[in-house]
Image (cartoon, coloured by chain):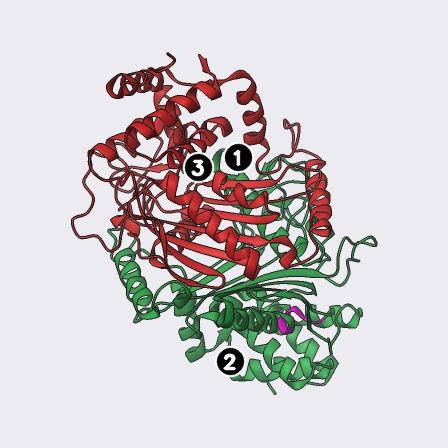
Chain colours: A green, B red
Amino acid sequence: MNFDFKDLFAFTKDIFIKIGCPEADAQSATEVLLSADLRGVDSHGVARLSGYVRLWEAGRINPTPNIRIVHETPSTAVVDGDGGLGLVVAPIAMQIAIGKAKNAGTGWVSVKNSNHYGIAGHHALQAVKEDMIGMSMTNASPLVSPTFSKERLLGTNPIAVAIPAGEEPPFVADMATTTAANGKLEILQRKQQEAPTGWVQDKDGNPTNNAFGVKEGGALLPLGGDREHGSHKGYALGSIVDIFSAVLSGANYGPWVPPFVAFLEPDPNPVGEGIGHFFGAMRVDAFRPADEFKGHMDNWIKRFRAAETTPGHKKVLIPGDPERALEIERMENGIPLLEPVQEDLKALGEKLGIPFRG
Amino acid sequence: MNFDFKDLFAFTKDIFIKIGCPEADAQSATEVLLSADLRGVDSHGVARLSGYVRLWEAGRINPTPNIRIVHETPSTAVVDGDGGLGLVVAPIAMQIAIGKAKNAGTGWVSVKNSNHYGIAGHHALQAVKEDMIGMSMTNASPLVSPTFSKERLLGTNPIAVAIPAGEEPPFVADMATTTAANGKLEILQRKQQEAPTGWVQDKDGNPTNNAFGVKEGGALLPLGGDREHGSHKGYALGSIVDIFSAVLSGANYGPWVPPFVAFLEPDPNPVGEGIGHFFGAMRVDAFRPADEFKGHMDNWIKRFRAAETTPGHKKVLIPGDPERALEIERMENGIPLLEPVQEDLKALGEKLGIPFRG
C-alpha cells in the first residue's frame, strides 16, 4: 500500500509540532525524514518517527534547542546541538559549513550534543545547490565490531559525498561503512532468509549467516567482511567517521555513543555530549571555474555509464542513480510502507491526536 | 637479505641526482620512496626506482619542474606539478595545505600535471607533526573495474588519513580502495597461489581466483568484491578519490590516467594534464583545544586496543600499528629486498654509474 508524499509529510510535521518543535524546525525535520523514504532508505524515514517520539518522551530530546557555534576559524566550526533532534541540528550545521565555504573556499563543521540525523546523503546534497561538493557523516550507536574484535565499538557510521555535475544529475555516494546496513538484515529477517557471509558475526565473534546474529548479541561487520577481504579498511573508515564526528567536536564516541532506542539507557559515564556529526562543503570554483568542473564531471559520468558490462548486467550505475530513480517514482506513485510501520504510525497518531491518513 | 636504510637512501638519492633532480628534490623524493620500504609497502618503495628512471628516459618526467599554485582561496589551492616526479610534487603540495590550515583552519590542495607520488600515508603524516589531521589521496593508472563494469576505469586510488594523538602514536589509515592492493597479488603470483574470491575478475568480467587475472586482461575489484558484499561502496570511494584528485584540479581521470609503466603510451587524447592528487590538513585546534583532542584520541585508541578479541586473534589493531612496528624493526635490522629487486637496482646502478652496495 502506497502513501502520498504530501499526506505523509503533513502527518509527520504535525507530530513534530505536537511534541513541541517550533514550526520551522518541524518543517526541517520532516524534510530530512521524508527524504529517506523518497530515496528508498526506508529504515531512516517515517519508520523511525515513533522512535524519535519515544526519545522525546524519555526526556532525551530538547524540542527547543539553542543550536550555536562554540568555536570557529575562517573554515571551521564546532556546533553544539543543545540536545536537539539531529534532524533539526544537521541542516543548520550544514548551512554553517556552506556559509564558511562561501568566504574561505571550504567549510568544515563538527557537531556535538546532537541526536540521530536521518539520511546522510540528504545533508550532503544541500551543498550541491550552491555549486559545492557536500560531505556528511555521523557516528551512531555501537553495532559494529572492528576487525578481530568481539565487542561492538562502532556504529554503522555512514559517509555521504555529493558532487555537482552539469547536464548530468549529481554524483551522490551515501554508504554505511559496514558490508551491509542494518536495514538489509531486517529485510532478510522478515523473509526468514540467511545473511551472506561477511555481513555478521555471532556473540562469540565467529562469522555467521544468521540474519538475527546482531539481535542475538553479535555484530555487523565492517565493509570488507573479514581481514582477507579488507575489513580493516571498513574498520578504518568507520573509525575516521567516529573521530571526525565526535573526538573533534566533544561528542561521545565508540562504545559510549548513546543508543537510539529509548529503552536502553545511555552510558552513565559519558566521554562527551550526545552524538556527533561532521559536515563539509567545498566550493567547486575554489579550485577551477565551475563550468569547467561541471563539463568534466559530465564527461566522467558519461564515460562510466557507457562502460561495457559484466555478464548478466545491463549497465554500470553512477552513485546516486538508484536513489534518484526511486525518488522520481515515489513522488509520482507514493511511498510504500510495510504493514508494521503503518500500524506503528496509526498508533502514534491516535496517541497524539493526529489522524494518520485522516 | 637485508639492506641498511642509510645505504639504500644514499643510493636512491644519488640516482635521482644523476637523472637531473636538484639536490633538495632528490632528498625529498628519496624520503618518500624509502618511507614505503620502511613501512612495509614494498611495492611502492625502491622496487619502483627503475620504473621512475624509465619514465624519465622516455621524456615523461620533468627533472626541474616549476611547481606552482595556479588558483587559490584562503583554504584551497590548485597546484600545477609541471610534469615533475610525484615524489617531489606531493611534499610541496602537502606543505601548501598545511600552510593554508595555519591561517584558515584547514587547507585543501588538488594537484594536476603530476606523476606517481609513492606511499599515500607518508604525505598525510606530515600534517601530524603540526598537530593537524592529514589527508592524502591520488588517482592512478586504470586497473580496477567499477561494479558491473568489464572495463578498467579506476586506479587502486588510495586514501590516507593520519590523526595525531597524545601519549599514543598517531592513527594512520592508508588503504587502496580495492579489496586488495596489486602488491598482494604479486606475492601470490610468486608463490603460485590462488587469489581469494572477491579480489579479481577475468577479462570477460567473471570472478576468478587466478592471481594472474589482472595481467591477463582482467581487473582488480573495488573494496567489497561484489555487489552483495558492498563493492558499490569501494567503487564510490575510488571514484571520489579520482574526482577530488583530477576533476577538481584538471588532471586526467578514469581511463585517461597515464600509465606508470614507460612501455605503455599515454592516451593521445588526454582529458587533462598528468596524474592528480588531493591533500588536506585540518588544524585540530580549529575545532577544540589540541590537548583536549589528544587526550580523547588516547582514550579512543586505548579502548579499541583493549577490546575483547574474536577466537584466534590476540589483539585489536589500531590503523597504523603494523606499519609502525615494521618501521622500527626495519630501521634497526635493515630492509629486506626480493632477489629480482636487488638485480634490478644493481643493473640500474651499473647503467648510471652509481654502485649498488659499493
Q: Are marks 2 and 3 on the same chain?
A: no
Task: Please say if the residues under marks 2 and 3 sit with CB atoms less than 8 Å apart.
Answer: no
The span shown in magenta is: A84-88
Give the residue furthest to the right: A268
Tell me if I can see residue B65 in this picture.
Answer: yes
Q: Is residue B53 left or right of residue A198?
A: left
Q: Which mark is residue A227?
A: 1
Residue at numbered disc 2: A5
Q: Amino acid at mark 2?
A: Phe
Q: Is residue B249 above or below residue B13?
A: below
Q: Which mark is residue B119?
A: 3
Q: For the residues carrying marks 3 and 1, which lies nearer the camera in this image?
A: 3
The quarter of the displayed image where residue A56 is located: bottom right
- Residue at 30% in and 32% down: B52
Please state which of residues A240 and A342 is positioned toward the viewer in this rendering: A240
SS for callout 2: helix
Give the residue furthest to the front: B23
Q: For the residues carrying marks 2 and 3, which lies nearer the camera in this image?
A: 3
User: What is the C-alpha distance between the residues marked 3 and 1?
Assistant: 21 Å
Q: Tell me the quadrant of the picture where the N terminus of chain B can be found.
A: top left
The quarter of the displayed image where residue B33 is located: top left
Chain letter of the residue carrying label 2? A
Q: Amino acid at mark 1?
A: Arg
